[in-house]
Structure formats: structure tokens, C-alpha cells
Amino acid sequence: MRRVAVIGVGVTKFGKHDRTSAELFAEAAADAIGDADVSPAAIQALYYGNVTGGEGEKQLHMGPLAATLLGLPTIPTTRFENACATSHAAFRHAMMEVASGISDVVLVGGAERVLNIPTDAATEYFAYCSDASMEQTAGLTFPGVFALIARAHMEKYGTSEEQMAHVAVKNHRHGVLNPKAQFRKEITLETVLKSAYVADPLKLFDCCPFTDGGAALVLAAEEVARKRPRAVWALASQAATDTMFMHEKRDLARVMATERAAVAAYRQAGKTPADVDVVELHDCFTIAEIVATEGLGFFEPGAGGVAAEKGWTSLGGKIPVNPSGGLKAKGHPIGATGAAQIAEIVNQLRGEAGARQVEGARTGLTHTLGGNTATVLVSLFGRD
Amino acid sequence: MTENGLTLKHFFEEARAGRLTGIRCGKCSELSIPPKQFCPGCQERNWTPVPLAGKGAITSFTVIRVAPRGRADEAPYAVAVVRLDEGVSLLGRIVDIPFDALRSGLPVRFRPLVKGEETALGFGPV
């Protein structure tokens, strides 16, 4: 297999847009191609991610549409859907196309648009990512999924609502430093703790927002990447799946797919958690960040809440987590999130992350979780 | 009937009549819901449907206050993962138990929630 690098990244402003998801992706993709300093004609394939376009925009067959609006209507393209891990899953497959030698330069990314529809409709479409037969009929929502996890974690380890609130405060503090973030405003612990319950014990400020946005990456084989000093190597990309049913999870206080994907990714890259300098992980809810920091091996099981409280995951802490502001403050356009996380890590490893730069970062990790913890992707990146 | 002797349609027809059904692996005795082809534990394809008593205890729960479209009139409502006495778990809507009485370990009993054509899994007081 050939080495693969990310040679270009592009991310739209996250927030509310009056453009379609395919338009948002096309903008991010054009920026990524410009950043990569390759001709648009060099792109050999597009791996495109979107989740709710069929429901919210009445749009399927969206890969060719995205390619058409980009101005590259003849490149082979396929749309990926893996709930909130959509474009990270697309990334892994794009990486395999380059690693295998099929293509030298490939475009990957995704976009989502949901702020054009009412919140209850978006909540319904997101809930389609849980099982239709038993979970949707019981009225389970995504905050509900993570509320079940939060309560299990609180009862097993003593994690508190205040510790969860620290994650929100930290990610909003980071988001202030990110010009692309949806929210660029600090919040206090009190704001989080006094916000209304959405799904007990999770409150409004424990939840990431609905977001419109797009993100894109240009991947290239070593021969292309070697001529580009800003290239960042994709050292590993692994996917893991767990049962779709919350009632079949082995332990509600853990995300087994995170643990399996992480072990496989560290092995593929020849790295350990101690080698990682900067992390973008899936904080769709504050408890999700706490459980992920444990599952990725940065803290012992049950110690993630204390780590958040002590500031160990803050910029300047032991292991900076979500310097971009994370899903919580940067925003979560679900089809774009995985690619946007990778774009942040690429910028960090290039030393181009501006006010939120983790000084001297050489190795970065991205973690994206899909749906009711049934899909997880973990990738590792590095500089020579 | 399929290889496992149970389809989702049959599972819900039975549930609508108040009867919970699981499938038991003929090799390793694992009990499972919903019906599936291979046993996730031992990969055997040899299931037998088994009736379940419907009694269990709450493992984790939440009170959902922001509902999806079409369920706003039902909110707030509680959803829980329940471990049945036979050792298999299920997720369902909690009914007829005050929110402040909910706790892990609380005994509950299965009851079908019928709304038009739809059957949902519910759990109420024992």
C-alpha cells in the first residue's frame, strides 16, 4: 500500500446558510483544491458525504450533483452515509483508493443543511439514525441516546453534571479562537447548569447545535505529496461497528466501537495515546467527549470527568481536545463533521491554526462517532 | 418463517398481544432480541423462539423533553433500557411511573403501547 497525505483542506463558515448542501460542499472543495495547489483537472474521484439531504432537501443522487456544482461533472463519485461519522467514513475509503494505487489525487468531504427546516423535523431526521422498529417507536432521540450513556457513566463512575458542563465551557472558549465556528462566545458553568433539560441529565448547553456547513480534503499519493511541504500524512484510518441497538450495548458507560477503532488505528500507525499532541473528537454531547477521552486511551475508564474538570483537555493542558471548538461550539453539520475535524488537525500539524495552535504539534488524532454509537472512525495524522 | 423462526413483524404482532418473544441460540444458549441470522456470540445459525415473562429492572433511563416531530404531544416522556429477568435487555417507553420515582434497578413489567398501526415497547409498574 502507498502512503497517503492530505495536501489540501477547505471548510465553509459553520452556522446558518441560504445555500444547498451541495453548494456548501462545492465551495469547501474549491477552497481545498486551491489549498492543495493542484489543477481541478487532477482530481480523479469524489467521495461525498451527506446524511439528511433526502429528507430535508428532497435530494438524492447527491454525489454527481456535488461534482457538477463544483465544475467537475465527469469524475466518478459515490455518496456515503454513516450517520454523524459520514465524511470520516468517506475519508477512509478515499484513502484506500489512493493507497491501493487506483488514483493519485482524490477529493473527499461532505456537507449538511438542516437550519432550513424546523427543529422538530431535524430531530426526527437525526433520529432516523437509530433503529426504526424499536427505538424510534419508543420515542428515543439523539440527546436521549447520550442521556442513557450519561446516566450509566454517572452511576458507574460518579461523573457529575458539573464535570460535563466543564466540557461545554472549554469548547466554547476554544470556539472563540476559530473564525469558522458557529458560536464564538464564552459561556459560564452557571449558563450550562441552569439551561433547560433536553433529555435528563443532559441540558441544552450539553448539546451541540444544528448546523449548516461543508468541508473538503484533497488526498494524494506520496509522489504528489512529496513536492508539497505542507502535506500531512494520514498514518492510519480505522472503522469499527457496534450493535445498532442501545439495549444490546455491552456497557452503556463505554463506547466499544471507539475502543476497537482506537486500538486498530494506534496499531496501524505504530503510535500510542502518549504520542498524540492534539485531538479532534466527537463531542456531540458533553458526555460523549468524556467517554471518548477514556475510550481513546488518554485517561483511565471513569477519569474523563475529572480530566475535564481539571482542565487537562484544554488548550495548554496535558492533551488539548477540540481546539477548533469541537462540535459543541464550531458546530456539527453532520455530513461535513469528519472532514472538518481532519481539516483542523491538518492545520494544527502544519502550524497554521492561528490563535488556537497547539505549539509543536507533530501527531494528531480524529475521532468521529455515528448514530447511537454504532459507527466510529479513528484516524491518525503526522508530519515527517 | 426464517431460519431463526421469528421475524420483526411476528415479534411485534406478539408484542401487540402482550407477549414478548426472544430467540435462543441452540449452541451457546444466548438469548437475543431482535431476531437475527447468526448468533453474535458463537456464529451458529440455529435459533428457537422463546416466550419471555416481560419482567425486569431499569438499567438506565432518561426523560425526553424535546421530542421528534409527531411526538410533541407525548413529551415529556421517559425511555429506559430494561434488563429482563431472562438476561436479555430491551429499550422501551416508561408509562405510569412518576419521573421522580425512576431509578436504576427499579422493577418494571412489559406492556405494549398501541397507537393505530404502530406498536411500541413499553414498561410500566410491576
Image: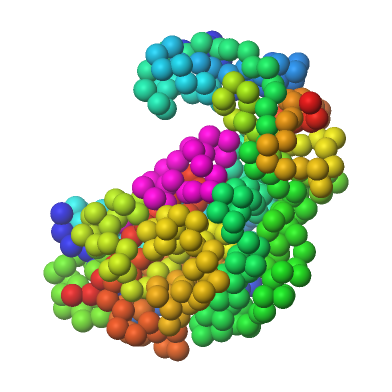
How far across and down, in percent of the image, does residue A215 sit? 45, 69
Q: Is residue A144 left or right of residue A156?
A: right
What is the magenta range? A237-260
The image shows residue A138, relative to residue A253, as above or below, that is above
The residue positioned 28% from the left and 57% from the top of the image is A266
Q: Is residue A44 left or right of residue A60?
A: left
Q: Nearer the viewer, residue A68 or A142?
A: A142
The residue positioned 26% from the left and 71% from the top of the image is A382
The image shows residue A313, relative to residue A110, as above or below, that is below
Which of the image's four quarters has the N terminus of chain A?
bottom left
Residue A106 shown in magenta: no
Residue A241 shown in magenta: yes
Q: Is residue A6 left or right of residue A85?
A: left
Q: How is the image coloured?
A: rainbow
Furthest toward the bottom, the residue is: A355
The image shows residue B39, relative to residue A339, as above or below, that is above
Which of the image's four quarters has the C terminus of chain A?
bottom left
How far across and down, in percent of the image, does residue A117 sit? 70, 60
How far across and down, in percent of the image, does residue A194 sit? 76, 70
The residue positioned 46% from the left and 73% from the top of the image is A313
How far across and down, in percent of the image, does residue A156 sit? 56, 49
Q: Is residue A354 visible?
A: yes
Q: Nearer the viewer, residue A228 or A171?
A: A171
The residue positioned 29% from the left and 72% from the top of the image is A363
